[in-house]
Image (cartoon, rainbow, N blue to C red):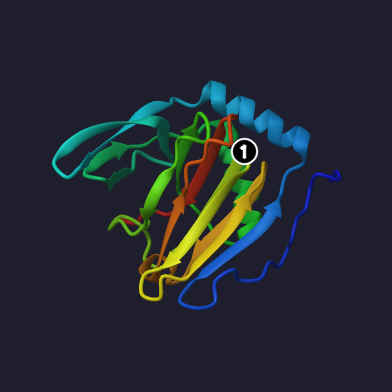
Amino acid sequence: MDLFTQFSENPSNLLPKDGTALYYGTIFGRDTSDTYFETLKNTIAWKHDEVRMFGKHIVTKRKVAWYASSALSYTYANQTKTALPFTETLVALKKEVEATTKATYNSCLLNLYHNGTEGMSWHTDNEKELQPNGAIASLSFGAERKFAFKHRETKEVVSLVLQHGSLLLMKDTIQQHWLHRLPPTKKVQQPRINLTFRTIVS
């Protein structure tokens, strides 16, 4: 591990109640993180995301990809995606994440944000295909970005900065009680790649 790595093996819960969010910090050193970023950027089958909101068909600026251990389907924003098979790189990252979080995953949704003007609005990952109260492990590579949680009832907000090579775990009842988002910012000019490992159930 180098000086860039700030890893916590037993992180404390960031949320005061109604769910669990654990930030492990950087689980990869800078050189390893740089390599993963370049590999993912150049080998993943990126496509602009297409969603339907308020009756309108919208093509997002950010790009996405959906991979899994089998041809699993996943529906969100009224669009259904069928998974591509895991690449060797994704298998290696999945093993690292599983060893750290002590959970298993069979799929991964990836997002490529070209700069800080691209983000995600408040939402939850509560699609019917996902394992109820299951773990979702979020890996970040590239530009550091602010990430925020907001409680549905109290409107309390908890924020943190996701670092290059870092891991955030969301689990338990968090999707029922907390929204989360990646707010846009004009201060960030560099790209970011985010991988969310999750479990799809039949």
Quarter of the rendering occupied by the C terminus? bottom left
Q: Position of residue 57 (x, y in %)?
A: 19, 33
- Residue indicated by mark 1: 141
**Residue at point 62%, 37% (across, down):** 143
Q: Between 71 and 125, which is closer to the camera in this rendering?
A: 125
**Residue at point 49%, 52% (across, down):** 105
Q: Between 40 and 56, which is closer to the camera in this rendering?
A: 56
For this orientation, the residue located farthest to the top is 42
Compared with 100, 87 (above or below) is above
Q: Quadrant of residue 199?
A: bottom left
Q: Is residue 135 visible?
A: no
Badge 1: how crowded within 10 Å, few (<14), some, or many (20+)?
Answer: many
**Residue at point 86%, 45% (across, down):** 3
Compared with 120, 8 (above or below) is below
Helix, strand or loop under label 1: strand
**Residue at point 61%, 60% (across, down):** 101
For this orientation, the residue located farthest to the front is 186
Q: Position of residue 38 (x, y in %)?
A: 63, 25
For this orientation, the residue located farthest to the left is 55
Q: Between 181 and 6, which is closer to the camera in this rendering?
A: 181
